[in-house]
Amino acid sequence: MVPRALFRILQCPTCGSRQLYVTAAGVHCAGCANIYPISQGYLDMMPRNAQFGYRSKYVTEEQELASELDYRELAPPLLAAGVRHRAMQRMLDLQPGDIVLDNGCGSAKFAAWNAHRVALMVGNDPATLFAEAAVERVALVKADSRVLPFADDSLDKAFSIDVLEHFPREVIDAYLRETARVLRPGGQMFIFSNTRERSPIQPVIDLSRHLGQALVRAGLYDFEREARRKSDHLKALETWDEVQDTLARAGLRPVRVVFWNSLFTTLVEHVVMKLGEVVVGGNGWSRKRQPVCNEQQTAGQTGAQTVGDQSIGAREIRARQRMRKRLERRGATYYALQAVTLLMELDLWLFGWMRSGSYFVVVEKGEKIEQAGQAGADFSDE
């Protein structure tokens, strides 16, 4: 979705000009003569001729991930995603008049879940793995967070969920600096990410991990798909002190923080839900992957989703697809998963004061900060 309201906050990511006009071909910049096209429900605002020293695997391997990730259909906010969603709603206080940015939105599921609560919800990502519901509800922009295509002080709020852990430090600095630039003074940003710090109750948490590993050794399931999804996690900010220092450099001040000591969450994710995927996914226990014909594969699908594939990865995807159909009916399965989500959320209520690696933080932009770079400069990290 590319609403007219989006055009009012744009600026050229290549030269920084706000002299933009819209035609059927897209957004034209009078300053540098570049054209930014509208394509498949999103606006392509990637800077032209910019050389970035770091690029996420979601950009460099976008086609491969598009065929592997089950991202097109949007489920209700439940389980770990539900905990993140509910935490953001409590901590960020979105208002009907707000213009809000999901910076590094991925599939834009969090943006889609909250779009009805604000005046304009914008989702930004350099990869275009957007859920179909997000295309319908969110103003989606293909852009790089190091050079956002939005005017200074143009946004009321922003959020960043599962983003910072993917970046090296220099990219984190640029990402936060740019987010601060586009936020109005006093504007707030909600961040969920994690460091390398262990929870004070880590030995108890690890009991669930050990049980999960025993079930993996028994051949009931594995965590290979999850490991691939997290394979580019750098966790360059290793401690909460480093997080605070980095936020301060960007002109952002923490106003509230809650830590996620995942006692109940780890039990759910490593044991309960994985066993549930075994039951719901069905179609055998074998790890063996059956051959698949190319014509069976369609956009957004993989061989793991075809009939006859009995791999564990295929079973996970089948379980998710079947579960989504059950959740649409808002029956017993939906309310059972709501109860499990609330169980996972107990980790925040009971242990949120206890410093650990995973954190939810709301930060606020102070007085207008000096920009560290100029539009149109060399964006290389070298």
Image: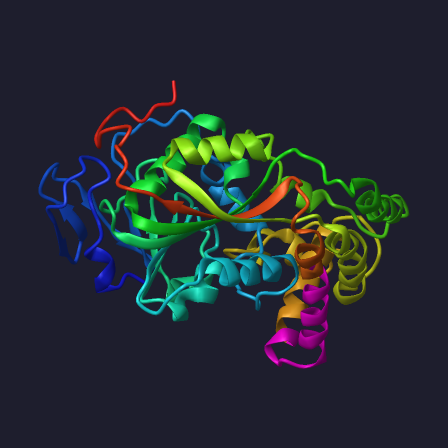
In which quadrant is the N terminus drawn?
A: bottom left
Q: Residue, x 79% and y 54% (percent of image)?
A: 267
| Camera-side residue of 101 and 226 | 101
Relative horizontal placement of residue 115, taking residue 81 as reference (left or right): left
Q: Where's residue 367, x and y in %?
A: 28, 42
Residue 378 shows in the view: yes
User: Quadrant location of residue 202?
Assistant: top right
Residue 346 painted magenta: no
Identify which residue is drawn at 67% across, 45% down. 226
Question: What secondary structure prevails in the magenta region?
Answer: helix
Q: Residue 232, can we see it?
A: no
The quadrant in which the C terminus is found is: top left
Q: Quadrant of residue 336?
A: bottom right
Q: Position of residue 294 (x, y in %)?
A: 58, 51
Image point 40% across, 66% down: which residue?
Answer: 115
Quadrant for residue 279, please give it. Answer: bottom right
> Residue 329 colored magenta?
yes
* Image: magenta residue range: 326-344
The image position of residue 137, as x and y in percent, is 38, 67
Position in image of residue 185 (x %, y %)? 29, 48
Query: What is the number of callouts on the image?
Result: 0
